[in-house]
Image (cartoon, helix red, strand yellow):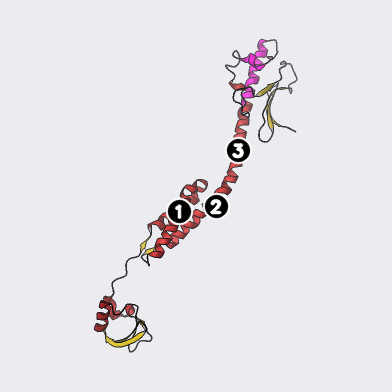
């Protein structure tokens, strides 16, 4: 086989296969140089000539970038864990960018750009979702805390009512003139006087109206001084019924 070669804009040859092998070995010709031989349909790179295959070293094995894999895994974890995923979303983005940069500079020796891009997309998606999820979660958390405080306040008020009823049994049906008279005979300490709805953790958080056991059942015996975020006040009536009453 005689080969005509096109190298650096100049055509030369024909050369025998041995001559071409020698020129490839000393660098005179390159694997990318175009060649043509009788019977060939068109010019083609020397590297594609089967008879010259042994003259070219095997292409280096392509490795998958470890950072691409890390970016993909971190991105998936961040997407699953949502709000707390920011802890893995940021590393996913960092690994993805570094991986794409290294793949670009590797000249084909590294692969995994698809995984890196997927990790980047998921990482950025979670980071963008954080403010939205936080905006939804905070009001729900505040409402749950407010409800828990209201229930604890109502429980305190009911226990104070029970102590007042016990006091009335021992005092001709009369309730105490003030809540301090319940301590320590009917309540061990003043802890129940503190209302969870109030920010004050030391003073009495309930308004007490006194009276006697025979008062109308729907008369308010005591109520919380503070209200919930929905402007609801804890009230307990003489008959022991308790409720959250919204202020008008």
Q: Which residue is mark 3?
A: 142
SS at mark 2? Answer: helix
Q: Pick the quarter of the image with the C terminus.
A: top right
Q: Mark 3 or mark 1, which has the lower sequence index?
A: 1
Residue 163 shown in magenta: yes
Q: Which residue is mark 1?
A: 92
Give the tally of numbered discs.
Answer: 3
Cα–Cα span, label 1 and label 2: 14 Å
Residue 14 shown in magenta: no
x%, y% of residue 162? 64, 19
SS at mark 1? Answer: helix
Q: Which one is nearer the viewer's eye here, 188 or 9?
A: 9
Relative to residue 58, is residue 242 depicted above or below? above
- Comparing marks 2 and 3, which lies closer to the viewer? 2
The residue that appears at 37% across and 63% down in the rendered structure is 110
Q: Which residue is mark 2?
A: 128
x%, y% of residue 124? 51, 54
Which contiguous range is marked in magenta?
A: 155-184
Cα–Cα span, label 2 and label 3: 23 Å
The residue that appears at 57% across and 45% down in the rendered structure is 134
Q: Pick the quarter of the image with the N terminus.
A: bottom left
x%, y% of residue 129? 55, 51
x%, y% of residue 36? 34, 86
């Amino acid at each position: 086989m005689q080969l005509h070669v096109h190298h650096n804009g100049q055509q030369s040859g024909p050369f025998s296969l041995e001559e071409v092998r020698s020129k490839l070995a000393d660098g005179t010709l390159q694997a990318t140089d175009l060649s043509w031989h009788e019977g060939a349909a068109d010019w083609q790179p020397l590297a594609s000539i089967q008879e010259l295959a042994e003259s070219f070293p095997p292409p280096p094995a392509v490795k998958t970038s470890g950072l691409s894999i890390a970016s993909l895994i971190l991105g998936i974890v961040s997407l699953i864990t949502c709000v707390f995923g920011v802890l893995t979303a940021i590393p996913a983005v960092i690994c993805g960018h570094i991986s794409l940069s290294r793949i670009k500079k590797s000249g084909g020796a590294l692969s995994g750009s698809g995984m890196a891009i997927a990790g980047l997309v998921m990482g950025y998606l979670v980071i963008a979702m954080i403010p939205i999820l936080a905006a939804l979660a905070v009001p729900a958390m505040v409402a749950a805390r407010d409800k828990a405080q209201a229930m604890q306040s109502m429980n305190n008020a009911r226990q104070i009512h029970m102590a007042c009823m016990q006091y009335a049994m021992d005092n001709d049906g009369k309730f105490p003139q003030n809540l301090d008279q319940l301590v320590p005979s009917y309540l061990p300490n003043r802890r129940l006087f503190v209302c969870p709805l109030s920010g004050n953790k030391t003073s009495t958080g309930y308004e007490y109206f006194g009276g006697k056991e025979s008062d109308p059942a729907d008369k308010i015996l005591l109520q919380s001084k503070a209200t919930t975020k929905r402007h609801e006040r804890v009230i307990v009536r003489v008959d022991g019924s308790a409720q959250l009453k919204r202020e008008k």
